[in-house]
Structures are given as structure tokens and as C-alpha cells.
């Protein structure tokens, strides 16, 4: 079980060097929003956002129907919630495309539809498992920029699982590095670029970005060498 304390509006990455997913571990996470209050899945809303396009609800469903899926499942299609969804569509540039089908939207737009579908149920913690891995590099950079800004605007804590060191550094307030199987926490890095109006793209331009990257890369190489010796 992983334990961690996070403040609201944090973005945390779990980076690991092996192939696999952390669903069994994440399901047992204890996340403290502050020193006096513990965030547990059983008493607080938590939701998965899968960014891969194959997780779109239906390829033949319009965006304005797609974003209501979570509310339908929760039987929460109230007037207030529908108005909130419309507000999100307008706020993030999708309202004029609300009648479009997935094959009529760009990859970035489909990602925003998926995110708004999750935001509609007002989750306290957002869990992203390799959310951007299916995108080409340029689209991936653009989408991470969009998603980061949206989550900051909405004040949502996010926990992201990724194999991409650069992605973890540029998007996160903290990066948790895991070992190979069986996964253990090897290190936790606090990421601070000391800049106003931070975004994933401008973080990559900072001199501190390469320092974080080289530090984690070197550490992961050492872990891999240790694992090879253990397996021999």
C-alpha cells in the first residue's frame, strides 16, 4: 500500500520502469488532503479518467451525450448538473462542437470530452493511468498542457501513472518513483520550478527540468542494475 499526503490542487506522478499497471495498489491508497482529514475512496468521491481514445464511451455518440455518461451511471442527471456540464463545454472550447461525433473531433478534443465527462461528477481526486500514451508526441504535448490548465482551474488533485520521466516532471508537484516488481517506493521528488503561471511546456524550458530529469534517470539506471544482479 502506498501512503502519501497531498494538498488540494496537487498533481502527483507515479513513475515506474517496468511494464504493468498499479490498479490493485491505487485502489488501496490513503491520501490525506490535510493533517486532520484522510481521503479514502469509501467516503470521498474518486474517479478514473482514462485518456486513451479506445476508452471513449461510444464511437457513435455525440460529444454532448458522451459527457453525461458518468452522471447517467450515478443517476445524477439533475438540471443543476446538466447546466454545469454545459458550462464546462463552453469554458473549455467544446460547446460549438457539442453535436459532433468522435470521428469528427481532433485527438485533443476527444481528450477534453473524456475529461469533462469525469469533471461532471465533481471528483475530489482524479486518477490517470497512462492517459496520454496513445497520442503522437506533438498532440501529447498540447493535450498535457490543456489537461494541466483545466485541472488547476478546477482545483482538482490528480494522481498520474506514467512511464515518461519528462511528462512526470513537467506536470507534477511530486513524483513517486517505484522499483521493478514487486513495486516499492524508491524515492519521492518534490518538483518546484519557482515560476509564476507554471505550465508543462514552460517547465520543459527551465534549466531545472534537465537537472530533475538527469537525477531521476541516473537513479533509475542504478535501480535497474540492482534488479539485474538480483535476478542473476
Image (tube, grey):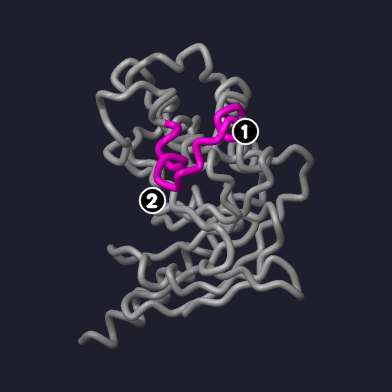
Direction from residue 130 to residue 85 in the image, left or right: right
User: x, y (%) of residue 47?
Assistant: 48, 53
Q: Compared to 160, does 202 lie above or below?
A: above
**Residue topped by disc 1:** 80
Q: Compared to 93, does 182 lie above or below?
A: below
User: x, y (%) of residue 112?
Assistant: 48, 31
What is the secondary structure assignment of the residue under circle 1?
helix
Camera-nearest label, 2 or 1: 1
What is the total number of numbered labels drawn onto the structure image?
2
Alpha carbon distance from label 2 to label 1: 32 Å
Q: Quadrant of residue 79?
A: top right
The answer to if 73 sits in the magenta stretch is yes
The residue carrying pointer 1 sits among few (fewer than 14), some (14 to 19) or many (20 or more) residues within 10 Å by Cα, namely few
Question: Could you tell me which residue is drawn at 48 percent across and 33 percent down?
Answer: 143
Q: Which residues are magenta?
A: 67-83
User: If the image is split into quadrants, where does the C terminus sit?
Assistant: bottom left
**Residue topped by disc 2:** 130
What is the secondary structure assignment of the residue under circle 2?
loop
Question: Could you tell me which residue is drawn at 40 percent across and 45 percent down?
Answer: 73
Q: Earlier in the sequence, mark 2 or mark 1?
A: 1
Q: Compared to 126, does 186 lie above or below?
A: below
Amino acid at each position: 500500500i502506498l501512503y502519501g499526503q497531498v494538498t488540494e490542487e496537487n498533481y502527483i506522478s507515479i513513475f515506474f520502469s517496468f511494464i504493468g499497471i498499479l490498479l490493485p495498489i491505487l485502489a488501496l491508497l490513503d491520501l490525506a488532503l490535510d493533517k486532520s482529514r484522510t481521503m479514502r475512496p469509501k467516503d470521498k468521491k474518486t474517479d478514473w479518467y482514462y485518456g486513451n481514445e479506445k476508452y471513449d464511451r461510444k464511437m457513435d455518440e455525440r460529444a454532448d451525450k458522451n459527457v453525461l455518461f458518468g452522471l447517467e451511471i450515478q443517476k445524477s442527471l439533475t438540471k443543476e448538473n446538466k447546466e454545469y456540464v454545459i458550462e464546462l463545454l463552453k469554458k473549455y472550447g467544446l460547446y460549438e462542437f457539442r453535436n459532433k461525433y468522435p470521428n469528427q473531433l481532433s485527438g485533443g478534443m476527444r481528450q477534453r470530452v473524456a475529461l469533462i465527462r469525469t469533471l461532471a461528477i465533481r471528483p475530489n481526486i482524479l486518477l490517470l493511468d497512462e492517459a496520454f500514451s496513445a497520442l503522437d508526441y506533438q498532440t501529447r504535448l498540447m493535450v498535457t498542457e490543456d489537461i494541466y490548465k483545466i485541472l488547476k482551474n478546477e482545483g482538482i488533485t490528480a494522481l498520474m501513472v506514467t512511464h515518461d520521466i519528462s511528462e512526470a516532471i513537467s506536470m507534477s508537484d511530486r513524483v513517486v518513483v517505484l522499483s521493478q516488481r514487486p513495486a516499492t517506493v524508491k524515492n519521492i521528488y518534490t518538483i518546484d520550478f519557482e515560476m509564476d503561471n507554471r505550465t508543462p511546456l514552460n517547465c520543459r524550458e527551465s534549466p531545472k527540468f534537465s537537472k530533475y530529469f538527469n537525477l531521476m534517470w541516473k537513479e533509475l539506471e542504478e535501480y535497474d542494475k540492482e534488479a539485474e544482479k538480483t535476478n542473476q
